[in-house]
Amino acid sequence: MWDSLLAASDVQSIIFFKGVVVLAIGMLVWNTIEVGRNDATNLVNAVYGARILNLRTAALVAGVGVILGAATSSRVIGTARTGIFDPTELDMNQALAAYISVYIVNTVLLYGYSAFGMPVSTTACLVFELLGVSIALGGFGIVHWQTAFKVILAIVISIFLTAIIGFMVQRAVRGAIGDRGRNLATLLLHGGWAGGGMLAGLCYFLIVKGMQDLTFVEALHQSVLEKYGIGMIIMTLWALFAILIHATLVIFREKAAYWLLPVLAVVGMISMGFAFGQNDLANCAAPGLAIWNLFRFENVAKATEVDISVWLLWVCGLLLVIGMNTKSALRVTRAAVSAGSMSHNVALYAPRWCLRLARLMMRFRGKEPTLAPPPMRSATGQRMHYDALRACVILGVSACVIALASNMALPVSTTYVAFAAVMATGAADRIMQRGDADLKIARTIWVVFSWFISVIIAAMAAAAVCWTIHHLAFLGIILSMSVNIVIRHFLKKKADSLDARTQEAAHERIYPERYAEYEG
């Protein structure tokens, strides 16, 4: 009798196991696309806001960097897969419940934020979801608190580091170049050192730091870096790139001056895509790939030790690019660009308490004039929210900070880093001296406040879903997925309605005479 019951139990476990694996593969695809809708849009915001490339072209070009960076993301995935808690303390069913719960919560959380045009950190959400499920299953003892605090601290430090560097670099290059970013005489004087410094930083942080596990980079490190030192290498790269840029300007004159900053911005976008592929790919890939390895090896310890295949990482990179080309991604990009816009009128939403706080803060702003160029339109008549100079700084600083974190195997937040770069460069240009400043500041307050809310929701929801799946098995999965779908439907209706009202309010501020006639 006991043998038959045990056999029945084993059959149920096998069915549950295989069912979860199939679901996990589907959720991996779904979650990666959701990350592309939200986090990956940070790659294209600067280039799109400066109208250097349209959104679809920018997403495809940035996608090349993402796919290339995915091949070197295994160190960060290792931290996301096993660094937050010890999966060997769990049995197979517990490990499956933990990893699938992360996806069920992450997909609806990211969808909700994307639908409302709100950037959210998939890194922070992942960390707190893993904390939630580990505590729900094994208590506080299986959590690697030192690693968890290290990751959280890295996220916080990356924000301040990006803000400080972004402000200083933007103020320096703006003071030198001003709004003469396509003036040949100005670029002959300043283009070499400014562009050379950006390229030298990207080259060092992405290749030397971000790709140090590759054989040729390791050999380069031993033969060159250890012999001459970091400072000498960076200065040499800076000088070489500066000479190359200056020579290009001398030879091609006005044509080179016209294209220099836009080309540097695109290079920065590809570099940030590479850094994103190294780092943030862990957020969407780690849980699903962990479940795949559980299916292959049927052993928790071995499944969490084996390396991830490069082709699986490339597939995840392609899925990110698909997510970047969706309607929700456009909404996130549009809102993020408008929050840091140098233009007068923007279409943004912020709650009333944020607006009141923003207006209170505006009383303490200085009277100095803005350093940003006057509001401009592109050749196709589209409003330019940034100029190419600011786009270069945003992307260059962001890519270097993310690559540095990848070198340390720390999954930091592309969202936080990119948003900090946009706000810091905007502060350096004093964009808040122009119209709708209260709305831009209020939106910034609302975004930052929502980040704190997101991690609380992530931890609590993941713990609840994990407990439900662990105790109710398939019934728990069906229940959790049903709630996921219902919440998505509700959020979509609310978000579409809010977006329509926000766009109408923006048009009313821009064209008050039309609405006055209508009301009359």
Image (tube, rainbow, N blue to C red):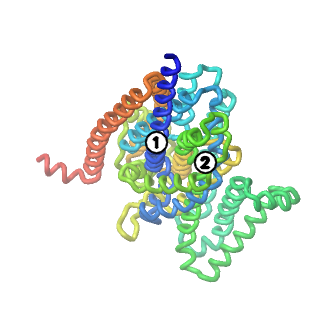
Left or right: 513, with 236 as reference point:
left
Classed neighbour count for the residue bearing mark 1: other residues with Cα under 10 Å, few (<14), some (14–19), many (≥20): some
Residue at horizontal 73 percent and vertical 53 percent from the top: 213
Q: Which residue is mark 2?
A: 279
Classed neighbour count for the residue bearing mark 2: other residues with Cα under 10 Å, few (<14), some (14–19), many (≥20): many
Q: Position of residue 98 (x, y in %)?
A: 53, 30
- The answer to which of marks 1 and 2 sits earlier in the sequence is 1
Q: Quadrant of residue 485?
A: top left
Q: Residue furthest front?
A: 1
Question: Which circle marks residue 179 in the picture?
Answer: none
Query: Eyeballing the image, is 397 above or below 263?
Result: above
Q: Quadrant of residue 107?
A: top left
Left or right: 205, with 289 as reference point:
right
The three-letter amino acid code for the residue at tag 1 is Val
Q: How many marks?
A: 2
In the depicted view, which residue is nearer to us: 93 or 170? 93
Q: Residue furthest top?
A: 1
Q: Residue furthest bottom?
A: 251
Assign a secondary structure to mark 1: helix
The three-letter amino acid code for the residue at tag 2 is Asn
Q: Position of residue 203 (x, y in %)?
A: 69, 61
Q: Position of residue 438 (x, y in %)?
A: 40, 41
Assign a secondary structure to mark 2: helix
Q: Position of residue 351 (x, y in %)?
A: 36, 34
Q: CA distance from mark 1 to mark 2?
A: 26 Å
Residue at horizontal 64 percent and vertical 31 percent from the top: 148
Question: Which circle marks residue 22 in the picture?
Answer: 1
Residue at horizontal 27 percent and vertical 51 percent from the top: 507
In the depicted view, which residue is nearer to us: 199 or 24? 24
